[in-house]
Amino acid sequence: MIEQSPAFKQLLKNLHQVPYLASKNLYRVTAYFLSIDTEKAQQFCNAIMQAKNSITQCTICCTWKEKERPCFFCKAPKRNQHIICVVETWHEMMAIEKTGGYDGLYHVLGGAICPLDGIGPEDLTINQLINRIDENVQELILATNQTPEGEATAAFIAHHLKDKTVKISCLARGIPVGSSLEFMDRVTVYKALSERRPF
């Protein structure tokens, strides 16, 4: 069996460590890398190493940036410097950015508070966020995911900023656009009703 090959086993082992690579696709991805020519495989490896060597986290907003260049978000002159949108990961940040409807700053927490997984406030960039809040920041948007962990993280941040004058808001919650009430769960319908707005 090919699985007994040391080289094959090592490749599978390393691919298995990729967090979002589903187990059912493991063999397909392995087959892809084995079937491409050596030049393409080398280009792929080079791209990973180049990214590892030239990309780092911004010390202000904690998203990715090139080491030799200023942060695309923090240092952009056209962005609103008075508002910060707080997200769990840079994936959420990119989802918001792609809407084209937000031009403020960001702060990436690096996850959410989850005691069951051993993730506490000290494991996230909450302290860096709190230190960013000064008289220049007028609004903080808590755009954490609507999960128990995300809401607990937002509540923790809001509690630690209660003595600040900054306005704290969160994303609207409720019925997704284009959906029907009959197919919504009761929590979503409740949120939509309790957080209704003028027509």
Image: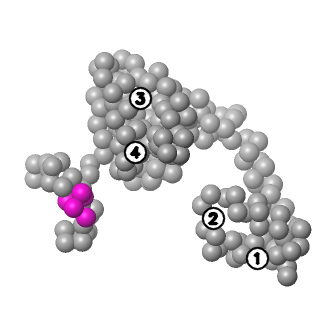
Residue at 85 percent of width and 82 percent of height = 1
Q: Which marked residue is nearer to the observer: mark 3 or mark 1? A: 1
Percent from the top left, x then y, of residue 94? 49, 50
Say which mark, if any, is on residue 31. Answer: 1
Q: Is residue 142 left or right of residue 57?
A: left
Secondary structure category for the residue under label 2: loop
Q: Nearer the viewer, mark 3 or mark 4?
A: 4
Q: How many numbered badges does the structure rendering display?
A: 4
- 104 in relation to 47, above or below: above
Cα gap from disc 3 to disc 1, whole angstroms: 47 Å
State which tag comes first along the sequence, 3 or 1: 1
Q: Is residue 133 above or below residue 177?
A: above
- Give, as a single range, the part of the protein colored magenta: 185-189
Front residue of 189/86: it is 189
Residue 150: which disc?
4
Front-most of residues 31 and 36: 31
